[in-house]
Image (spheres, grey):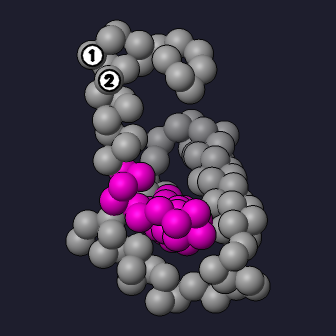
Amino acid sequence: MDFDEYQEEALKTAVYPGIGSNFVYPTLGLVGESGEVAEKVKKIIRDKKGVMGEEDRLALKKELGDILWYIATLSKELGLSMGEVAVMNVEKLRSRHERNMLHGKGDER
């Protein structure tokens, strides 16, 4: 499955206020789910001395799926396909790599 196929399938399950004209809802969901990933990783570090088991990996996989869903819906709200977002990101990273600018500050490096 590619990103655009995923986005199409994910959008079939999208139900939230103002769908089609509400970029705030998926933005907040994206931040919330990202925070859940961070919390799970924090607890692996705190409680398991950084050793990740299969149960932890599965829990993170589920949270990453939730993040992907919010990326799909936010992209749609912005009139973007996930495929074009992915292509643009790879092109940006490739350019930075070629110019030896992966490290540093700022978006426009």
Identify the residue at image location x=33%, y=59%: 83
Residue at the spot of label 1: 98
Query: Which is nearer the eye, 35 or 108?
Result: 108
From the viewer's perspective, tell me whether residue 74 is left or right of residue 6.
Answer: right
Examine the structure image and report whether residue 74 is included in the region drawn in magenta: yes
Q: Amino acid at mark 1?
A: Glu
Q: Can you give x and y, in whole percent of width and height, for residue 91 in the image?
A: 31, 35
Q: Can you give x and y, in whole percent of width and height, for residue 81 in the image?
A: 41, 64
From the viewer's perspective, tell me whether residue 82 is left or right of residue 28.
Answer: left
Examine the structure image and report whether residue 88 is included in the region drawn in magenta: no
Identify the residue at image location x=76%, y=85%: 17
The magenta-colored residue range is: 58-86
Identify the residue at image location x=41%, y=13%: 101
SS class of the residue under badge 2?
A: helix
The quadrant the N terminus occupies is: bottom left
Name the disc covering residue 85, or none.
none
Task: Estimate the spatial distance between the alpha carbons at disc 2 and disc 1, rounded to whole Å.
Answer: 5 Å
Q: Can you give x and y, in whole percent of width and height, for residue 48 in the image?
A: 57, 44
Residue 78 sits in quarter: bottom right
Report if the CB atoms under discs 2 and 1 are less than 8 Å apart. Answer: yes
Q: How many marks?
A: 2
Residue 90 is at least partly visible in this image: yes
Q: Vertically, is 2 above or below 105?
A: below
Residue 82 sits in quarter: bottom left
Identify the residue at image location x=32%, y=11%: 99
Tell me if mark 1 has few (under 14), some (14-19) or many (20+) residues whose alpha carbon lies within 10 angstroms of its own.
Answer: few
Residue at the spot of label 2: 95
From the viewer's perspective, tell me whether residue 17 is left or right of residue 66.
Answer: right
Q: Amino acid at mark 2?
A: Ser
Q: Can you give x and y, in whole percent of width and height, for residue 71 in the image?
A: 53, 62
